[in-house]
Image (spheres, rainbow, N blue to C red):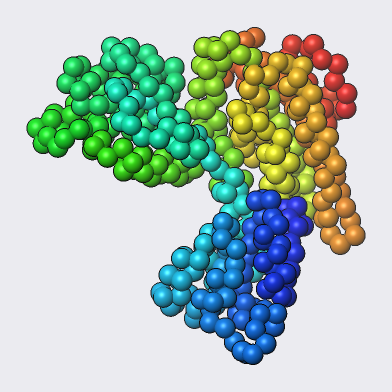
């Protein structure tokens, strides 16, 4: 199945009861793949009196609370009622056979990465809260920040960099220029959505609001409905972020996504008086890896490095595939020495990862890194340049090591 190339551990089941038990015991980190044709052959432990069960009955045996990837034939894929049945049966995705093993594993890797994506969507609201359930929204990774002064909203937005700004009709009528001020800031996010909340429909007010720069209008008479609409918008924002700011191969932030988030994190560090570290990582002798075993294998090395780094990142940290074989990490609330220890532990973990380049031939690879800290570096660009210079020193000094700036940590290879 080529799964070993991505550090996947794939288990195969021939009895439905065994599969169901494995799903029920899972801690939530697995993908569950079901081949529909094979599902009919996994019935011997169900009903001895009946030779077959209907597909709907079989799907009902699958534990709820989990999502499944269904593998079907081209003929099955042409039947819309079947697709409807799958979607209604906790379908995460479905794929059609025939599909090459390496292609299937690569697509499963992408689904695995997507399941890990749950970025916080920050919402700034000007005006009286509508009475929705704040705790429920936070559980869905929507962070609400309330503000009361329209004349300082632009300063709060500059500091918070929210994804959505909600303004009640009452506050808009008090200060009609509030949106124009927000949008004329040269640092304004062009994709930030600014929405007017109306207590009652008012076509004249709606026209004025749209002409002044509002992007959308929502009714606020039903708080629960408004919360549901906000969650849908948050999901669309996450998708848009992925398209613009995520690397398609690894699911990590790309250069654009990193720069946007790092700038916001530095602003937050300044407001809260917190330190942070920025590290630049580069896989050692990556050209040799590509030239020796091919670019496809090089892509596998990159993906497995992303799988090594991601579980070791905290909730407030950032991880980016900056380009090619180069990665960037940002550790939140982290001093330089602590950051060095964290990055060096990642280096050791990746160095211990086995790569089977051909049957019986296992190799190990390494990366080098440079590290710089805020507030010694005041901007994302300044931090990156300092860390990149230390990466160069690490490469020149023999590779497979982390060099900090300034040199306050005695690094060991």
Q: Is residue 346 left or right of residue 196?
A: right
The answer to whether residue 218 is visible is no
Vertical order, 303 against 272 (above or below): below
Q: Is residue 261 left or right of residue 112?
A: left
Vertical order, 409 against 70 (above or below): above
> Residue 106, located in which quarter of the rendered image?
bottom right
Residue 128 image offset from top left, x and y in percent: 29, 23
Identify the residue at horizontal 55%, vertical 12% (top origin): 272
Q: Is residue 74 left or right of residue 110?
A: left
The C terminus sits in image quarter: top right
The N terminus sits in image quarter: bottom right
Residue 143 image offset from top left, x and y in percent: 46, 30
Residue 299 image offset from top left, x and y in percent: 68, 49
Number of marks in picture: 0
Q: Is residue 148 left or right of residue 395?
A: left
Identify the residue at horizontal 82%, vertical 55% (top origin): 357
> Residue 177, located in which quarter of the rendered image?
top left
Which residue is nearer to you in this view: 28 or 132? 132
Which residue is nearer to you in this view: 15 or 163? 15
Identify the residue at horizontal 29%, vertical 22% (top origin): 127
Identify the residue at horizontal 77%, vertical 16% (top origin): 337
Which residue is nearer to you in this view: 146 or 345? 146
> Residue 2, located in which quarter of the rendered image?
bottom right
Please identify the residue farthest to the right as the structure is shown.
Answer: 360
The answer to whether residue 4 is visible is yes
Which residue is nearer to you in this view: 394 or 184? 184
Residue 129 image offset from top left, x and y in percent: 32, 27
Vertical order, 275 against 128 (above or below): above
Vertical order, 256 against 93 (above or below): above
Please identify the residue farthest to the left as the structure is shown.
Answer: 204
């Amino acid at each position: 199945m080529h799964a070993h190339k991505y550090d996947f551990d794939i288990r195969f089941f021939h009895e439905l009861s065994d599969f169901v038990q494995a799903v029920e015991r899972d801690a939530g980190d697995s993908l569950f793949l079901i081949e529909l044709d094979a599902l009919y052959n996994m019935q011997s432990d169900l009903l001895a009196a009946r030779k077959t069960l209907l597909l709907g009955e079989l799907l009902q045996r699958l534990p709820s609370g989990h999502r499944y990837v269904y593998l079907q034939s081209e003929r099955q894929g042409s039947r819309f009622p079947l697709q409807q049945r799958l979607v209604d049966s906790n379908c995460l995705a479905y794929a059609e056979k025939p599909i090459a093993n390496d292609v299937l594993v690569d697509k499963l890797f992408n689904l695995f990465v997507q399941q890990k994506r749950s970025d916080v969507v920050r919402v700034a609201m000007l005006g009286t809260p509508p009475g929705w359930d704040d705790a429920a929204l936070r559980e869905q990774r929507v962070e609400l920040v309330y503000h009361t002064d329209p004349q300082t909203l632009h300063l709060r937005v500059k500091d918070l960099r929210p994804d959505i700004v909600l303004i009640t009709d009452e506050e808009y009528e008090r200060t009609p220029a509030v949106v124009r001020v927000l949008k004329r800031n040269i640092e304004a996010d062009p994709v930030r959505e600014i929405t007017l909340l109306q207590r009652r429909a008012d076509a004249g007010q709606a026209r004025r609001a749209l002409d002044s720069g509002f992007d959308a209008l929502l009714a606020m008479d039903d708080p629960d409905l408004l919360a549901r609409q906000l969650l849908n918008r948050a999901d669309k924002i996450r998708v848009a972020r992925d398209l613009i700011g995520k690397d398609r191969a690894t699911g990590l932030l790309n250069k654009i996504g990193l720069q946007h988030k790092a700038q916001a994190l530095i602003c937050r560090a300044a407001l809260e008086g917190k330190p942070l570290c920025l590290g630049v990582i580069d896989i050692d002798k990556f050209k040799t890896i590509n030239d020796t075993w091919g670019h496809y294998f090089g892509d596998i090395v990159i993906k497995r490095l992303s799988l090594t780094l991601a579980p070791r990142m905290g909730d407030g940290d950032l991880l980016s595939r900056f380009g090619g074989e180069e990665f960037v990490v940002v550790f939140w609330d982290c001093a330089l020495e602590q950051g060095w220890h964290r990055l060096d532990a990642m280096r050791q973990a990746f160095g211990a990862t086995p790569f089977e380049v051909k049957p019986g031939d296992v190799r190990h690879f390494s990366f080098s890194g440079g590290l710089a800290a805020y507030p010694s570096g005041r901007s994302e660009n300044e931090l990156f340049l300092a860390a990149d210079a230390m990466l160069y020193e690490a490469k020149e000094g023999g590779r497979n090591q982390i060099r900090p700036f300034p040199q306050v940590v005695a690094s060991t290879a």
